[in-house]
Amino acid sequence: MTTDLISRVLITCPETGEAVETVFRLRPTAFEALKGQHSFRCSRCGQIHAWSKSDAWLADVRPRHM
Ligand SMILES: [Zn+2]
């Protein structure tokens, strides 16, 4: 069974060092195809962070807690 669920995209907040959700919700196939830089307002520290795919992971791939 392939997992094709839409997952939250997370990055590590550079201010707090904690995992934070971006606004992105992607299927694994769409995440693999993701290009370029993206920005969002961090829910941890309130600043705008720019990130690219190499900084990010899908919530279901590396779960920290449910
Ligand atoms: Zn932050």
Image (cartoon, rainbow, N blue to C red):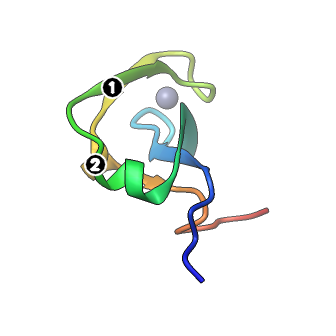
Which residue of the protein is positioned furthest toward the left in this rendering?
36
Vertical order, 9 against 63 (above or below):
above
Vertical order, 38 against 64 (above or below):
above
Where residue 62 sits in the image (x, y, percent)? 54, 68
Q: Residue at x 33, y 25 (%)?
A: 38
Label 2 neighbour load within 10 Å: few <14, some 14-19, many 20+: few
Q: Earlier in the sequence, mark 1 or mark 2?
A: 2
| Closer mark to the observer between disc 1 and disc 2 | 2
Q: Would the CB of label 1 be found within 8 Å of ligand 1? A: no
**Amino acid type of disc 1?**
His
Where residue 43 sits in the image (x, y, percent)? 62, 25
Residue 30 vs residue 19, the one in the foreground: 30
Q: Are marks 1 and 2 in contact (CB under 8 Å)?
A: no
Residue 45 vs residue 50, the one in the foreground: 50
Q: Is residue 18 visible?
A: no
Q: Which residue is mark 1?
A: 38
**Amino acid type of disc 2?**
Ala
Q: Residue at x 46, y 20 (%)?
A: 40
For label 2, the SS is: loop
**Gap in angstroms between the C-alphas marked 1 and 2:** 14 Å
- Tag on residue 33? 2
Where residue 47 sits in the image (x, y, percent)? 47, 16
Residue 52 vs residue 43, the one in the foreground: 52
Where residue 48 sits in the image (x, y, percent)? 42, 16
Vertical order, 58 against 46 (above or below):
below
For label 1, the SS is: strand
Q: Is residue 40 visible?
A: yes
Indicate left or right for 26 with 54 as reference. right
Quadrant containing the C terminus is bottom right
